[in-house]
């Protein structure tokens, strides 16, 4: 059996979990029961953590029973849900207005904040007839028909629905719908023509509670009653002072509803006691049924039910139909919803008959796959909506991935073609490069020859320029030298360094010594120094090696002073050089007097060593 043509229905009751798998016909207009399973949930775990009890039981049943379907529909016991029928004001077919009215009614009706629940509703339209007096004759009456609008609300706690959905999604199930058991049972009954010609009533006697459903045409009334088989179990445990498990076993072994009246009690004292307990509980249930019928007729203007169909786990307690017939004065029978489905030959009919009273909700969910049902409520939690949205977008994701792969393929093909074209161009270029390299070698050879000739020319040109530059510098130096100041030696140096200058020579009392000869290699071509005529400035000074670039001038010489003035000519000389275009006097450190020696005795001549920085260094050859 194909997974795609099956549907798994799950009815989560208060005490047990029912699952049935149906096959959908190829034409999509019939379903066939293929397999089913029923298992009780852990009572203790169900009371403390119902979602965990469901998850444990569901996983166990999936492993043991071989269900293959991946599409599921779920119904939840009304014990964990809220349902109510509310009358709405006329909205004249305005859907937006109807939605606003329904939401406002839901806020008033649902006993929980809407943010904490998942809720849905079904609008029910029906025609109501009124007798109206016509004319002056009060005895003459006409019947008018008015359309009324009702909303059937269903709500369930968000955390419970999300926990159930998460368990199913973890098993790779696709959740088609989540509803409550009464709506699924109503759809199954309507599919079997219940409530078409008369007002019929269904009583679902469950383990933890009961549901009363009234079908009147296309109208529905549902009320959850917190009385069920577990109520009898609790009373038995209290009466005999035993555990709930022992009381449940005793109920199943000896339990029946006492007939009352002139009927003789059972010979077994235990059975007689249990039967009376069951009758007391059923009497309470009868009172709730009457109260519900009165609410249906008075508040909603419904018709009186004419038949009663019973279903649910506690409906098979002996004499329950007899008791209800006696109290309600209605025809009582078991609800049979199997005519609208097929049964696979592989299903044991005798075993199915024993649990047939548990199937109406599962059949109601199954037929939603083949027809439009009167009530199609779906309590879909956010996690399922997100999963559905992801599934809806999957084709687009696949298409995007295919487009990306196609783009990559086109890019690869284009790149291959481009590579082939570029390889051809590279081969052509290699030949041209080979030709060009030979030409480049010849050009380089000629360029080397040209550079060699140009180097010789530049060397000669620099020598000429250096001679011209020195002449201009010396003329400018002479121009700005005060009259009472003269130089005995001028050296060109690359940079100023302290501690390298020789001390000025002492002048003896016999007069001023002659100027020693300058270093002919210090500044290129120049006049030789004066021959020494007298003793004096002839210290052991050795001129420095000629630098390859002259940035400073070292000036050795003398100046005339008078009185106590030890150096006014130096100050005047500095001021004059600041106006020169050849000397850089922007900073004080560019003009340094590193040695100055006053005259001894009555002589008025002083010696000095001055360093001056050039604006533009002069290259030496």
Image: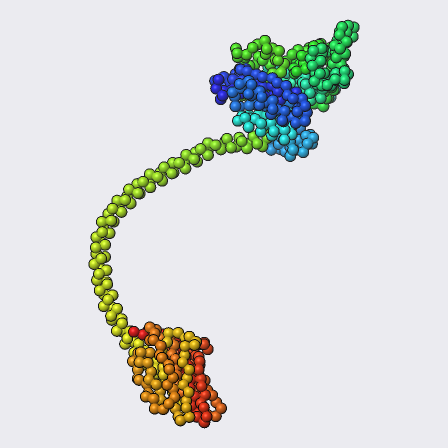
Point 37% across, 82% down: residue: 540
Residue in the picture at 40% in, 87% down = 558
Residue 279's place in the image compared with 533, above or below, is above
* Color style of the picture: rainbow
Task: Find residue 480 and report its horizontal and vertical position in percent.
Answer: 39, 84
Q: How many marks?
A: 0
User: Residue at the spot x=68%, y=15% of the render?
Assistant: 314
- The quadrant of the rendering that contains the C terminus is bottom left
Which residue is more in the foreground, 606 or 22?
A: 606
In this rendering, is residue 365 above or below 568? above
Asked if residue 167 shows in the view, the reply is yes
Q: Which quarter of the picture shows residue 217?
A: top right
Placement of 343 over or under 572, stated as above or below: above
Residue 144 percent coordinates (x, y): 67, 21
Please tell me which residue lies in front, 574 or 412. 574
Q: Is residue 188 left or right of residue 547?
A: right
Residue at point 61%, 13% (across, down) = 356
Among the 4 quarters of the image, the one containing residue 230: top right
Vertical placement of 554 versus 10: above or below?
below
| Residue 576 spot, x, y in % from top left | 42, 83
Is there any visible trace of residue 576 in the rendered image? no
Q: In the rendered view, does 108 fall on the left or right side of 38?
A: right
Residue 484 locus on image (x, y percent): 41, 90
Residue lying farthest right?
Answer: 262
């Amino acid at each position: 059996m194909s997974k795609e043509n099956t549907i798994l229905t799950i009815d989560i009751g208060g005490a047990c979990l029912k699952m049935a798998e149906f096959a959908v016909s190829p034409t999509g207009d019939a379903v066939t029961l293929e397999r089913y399973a029923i298992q009780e949930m852990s009572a203790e775990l169900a009371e403390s953590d119902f979602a965990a009890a469901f998850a444990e039981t569901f996983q166990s049943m999936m492993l043991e029973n071989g269900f293959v379907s991946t599409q599921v529909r779920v119904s939840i016991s009304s014990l964990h849900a809220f349902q109510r029928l509310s009358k709405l004001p006329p909205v004249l077919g305005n859907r937006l207005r109807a939605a606003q009215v329904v939401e406002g009614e839901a806020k008033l009706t649902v006993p929980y904040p809407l943010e904490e629940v998942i809720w849905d509703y079904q609008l029910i339209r029906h025609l109501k007839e009124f007798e109206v007096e016509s004319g002056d004759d009060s005895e003459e009456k006409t019947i008018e028909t008015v359309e009324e609008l009702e909303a059937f609300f269903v709500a369930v706690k968000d955390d419970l629905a999300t926990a159930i959905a998460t368990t199913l999604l973890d098993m790779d199930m696709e959740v088609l719908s989540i509803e409550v058991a009464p709506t699924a049972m109503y759809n199954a009954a309507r599919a079997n023509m219940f409530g078409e010609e008369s007002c019929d009533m269904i009583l679902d006697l469950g383990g933890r509670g009961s549901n009363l459903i009234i079908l009147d045409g296309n109208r529905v009334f549902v009320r959850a009653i917190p009385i069920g088989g577990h109520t009898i179990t609790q009373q038995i445990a209290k009466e005999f002072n035993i555990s709930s498990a022992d009381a449940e076993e005793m109920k199943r072994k000896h339990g029946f509803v006492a007939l009352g009246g002139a009927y003789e009690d059972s010979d077994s004292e235990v059975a007689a006691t249990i039967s009376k307990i069951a009758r007391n509980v059923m009497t309470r249930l009868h009172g709730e049924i009457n109260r519900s019928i009165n609410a249906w007729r008075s508040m909603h203007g419904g018709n009186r039910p004419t038949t009663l169909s019973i279903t649910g786990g506690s409906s098979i307690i002996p004499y329950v139909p007899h008791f209800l017939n006696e109290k309600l004065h209605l025809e009582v029978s078991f609800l049979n919803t199997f005519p609208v489905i097929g049964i696979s030959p592989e299903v044991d009919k005798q075993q199915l008959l024993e649990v047939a009273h548990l199937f109406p909700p599962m059949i109601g969910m199954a037929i939603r796959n083949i027809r439009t049902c009167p009530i199609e409520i779906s309590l879909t939690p956010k996690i399922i909506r997100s999963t559905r949205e992801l599934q809806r977008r999957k084709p687009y994701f696949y298409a995007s991935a295919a487009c990306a792969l196609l783009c990559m393929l086109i890019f690869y093909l284009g790149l291959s073609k481009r590579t082939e074209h570029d390889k051809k161009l590279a081969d052509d270029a290699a030949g041209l490069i080979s030709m060009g390299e030979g030409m480049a070698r010849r050009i380089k050879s000629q360029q080397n020859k040209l550079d060699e000739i140009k180097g010789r020319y530049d060397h000669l040109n620099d020598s000429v320029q250096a001679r011209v530059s020195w002449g201009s510098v010396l003329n400018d130096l002479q121009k700005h030298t005060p009259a009472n100041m003269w130089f005995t030696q001028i050296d060109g140096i690359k940079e100023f360094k302290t501690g390298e200058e020789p001390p000025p020579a002492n002048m003896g009392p016999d007069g001023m010594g002659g100027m020693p000869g300058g270093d002919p290699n210090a500044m290129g071509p120049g006049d030789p120094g004066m021959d020494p005529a007298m003793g004096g400035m002839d210290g052991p000074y050795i001129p420095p090696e000629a630098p390859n670039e002259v940035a400073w001038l070292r000036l050795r010489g003398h100046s005339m002073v008078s009185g106590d003035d030890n150096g006014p000519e130096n100050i005047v000389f500095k001021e004059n050089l600041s106006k020169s275009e050849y000397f850089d006097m922007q900073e004080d450190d560019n003009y340094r007097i590193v040695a100055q020696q006053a005259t001894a005795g009555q002589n008025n001549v002083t010696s000095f060593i001055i360093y001056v920085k050039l604006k533009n260094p002069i290259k030496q050859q």
